[in-house]
Image (cartoon, grey):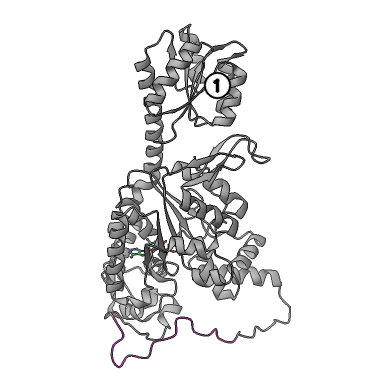
Amino acid sequence: MIGNRVLVVDDEKLVQWSLARTLTEAGYLCETAATGAEARKAFRAFGPDLVLLDVRLPDADGMDLLKDFKAVDQDLLVLMITAYADADSAVKALKLGADDYIGKPFDLDKIRHMVKQAFDKRVLKRRVQDCREELPRRYEYDNLIGNSPGMIEVFKMIKLCADTDTKTVLILGESGTGKELVARAVHYHSARAKAPFIEVNCAAIPEHLLENELFGHEKGAFTDAGARHRGIFEAAEGGTVFLDEIGDMPLPMQAKVLRFLDTKRYRRLGSEKDREANVRIIAATNQDLPALANEGRFRADLFFRLNVMTITLPPLRERKEDIPALVNYFLQCLNSEYGRSVEGVAPETMQFLLQYPWPGNVRELKNALERAMMMETGNLLRPTSLNYEIRSAEPSYNNGQGGPRSGSPPERPADPPAPAAPRFRLPPEGVNLEEVERSLIEQALEAAGGNQTRAAKLLGLTRDTLRYRMKKFHLFTRARTRRGRPPKDAPAAGEPKPAANGS
Ligand SMILES: Nc1ncnc2c1ncn2[C@@H]1O[C@H](COP(=O)(O)OP(=O)(O)OP(=O)(O)O)[C@@H](O)[C@H]1O
């Protein structure tokens, strides 16, 4: 159930009492008020999800209360009650945002039914919104390609996590290995599949906005808090909150998430009341959480709390036997996206794809194929359509046969030492240093397919420094889509902004 708090506002004690009793028996949490002043006070303190509101009160007009309450909480459900059931006030109430209207004397069963209907309508509305966002991506489990031993282990774990509704799941793996796909697969194969799956990129939302996004706020909680805001934990009721890049979550927020995991309780900003939420947390990171904990950047107790059901995605270089199937799959997707009919890759092209170490993992492979398709006019992707980096990679270990072959070159270290920095020659006419910096950042982002972590690595910067410089040059990498999440594979387009309203 999404919320169950009902405020009954009526000056007739008997009406108040009978409504409150009927609704309490039906499982709602009820409070009552007899005047406008009492109603306003109860609205602030009780935080109702639905108000049964008498139009005529001794000290106020119910329509004014309706207007004021809706201004604070757009999602509030309101059923108007009046002794004078006339069409004009019904229309006025509905225009002001009331959900329904009932004349006195009324039947208690009818009220109970109307209240239930109003709550059901809200659940439905949330689901429809959610479906609009999620439907195209819903079946991505079937699109999780791979039959290497590493991926078979992953599939087993997805099933186990989907079948057992543990409070948390932790997904580990390098950038681009498919952590988000796995999180969706767990959700959509679990008993929570029909409830929302809401994703929050902890690295993309500024620290001061993250708590607001997750937990919501009360009106007046801070300067711009003109209205009450329901957070993502509330919007995801019954479903899953996917905390991506949890390694980047600020420490104070980690403490709050830990408290929620321990108690299922949280507080909206500016509220002194705990709220409960039935949501499962799936967290993902490409960082080494124990190492972050050693450095004091990640709470060890949160790590232990999260590290119960853990799915570890192997990097692509350790499961190269999955490459041919991934290539086929992505070519099919790209053919339908671009109206092409590329049949496959030439054998020599496949050799290059198998020997390249894919530091950006599956995302990089997908981007490389997209680029190759754009470069190629024929129906077979030739090596020349691959970018230079891939063509010039030395043969590496695990060439697609499921493990290193005897006689194959020794395994390269995962992170080869950075080559000595080239010496740039200053042209006699000089350069504009800012232009050079900007151009290098653009090139790094392009080479990394828009992945900031990898682009930062290419430039020898931390991701935060890269972001700072991108901001300075107004460089934008990815178009934002839903709830604070840029599509990871989108071509260069938009600097992360705070996530959208979770309600
Ligand atoms: N096994 C797979 N089968 C098909 N597509 C995959 C697979 N793994 C990853 N992809 C694709 O690769 C891209 C990156 O995947 P995803 O966003 O899930 O990675 P990630 O591990 O969450 O990355 P990051 O750490 O950067 O957030 C997506 O387009 C995804 O669809």
Quadrant field for ligand 1: bottom left
The one nearer the camera, 21 or 353, is 21
- Residue at horizontal 39 percent and vertical 20 percent from the top: 22
Crowding at mark 1 (Cα within 10 Å: few <14, some 14-19, many 20+): many
Where residue 204 sits, quadrant-wise, is: bottom right
Where residue 152 sits, quadrant-wise, is: bottom left
- Residue 447 in view: no
The total of numbered circles placed on residues is 1
Q: Which residue is mark 1?
A: 66
The location of residue 214, given as percent across then percent down, is 52, 48
Q: Is residue 221 within the magenta segment?
A: no
Q: State whether residue 220 is above or below residue 367.
A: above
- Residue 385 in view: yes
> As shown in the figure, which amino acid type bears the numbered disc 1?
Leu
The location of residue 57, given as percent across then percent down, is 57, 12
The one nearer the camera, 439 or 158, is 158
Q: State whether residue 130 is above or below residue 208.
A: above
Q: Is residue 414 within the magenta segment?
A: yes
The one nearer the camera, 60 or 316, is 60
- Residue at horizontal 50 percent and vertical 40 percent from the top: 275
Residue 375 falls left or right of residue 257: left
- Residue found farthest to the bottom: 407
For the stretch drawn in magenta, the main secondary structure is loop
Q: Which residues are magenta?
A: 403-420
The location of residue 93, given as percent across then percent down, is 50, 17
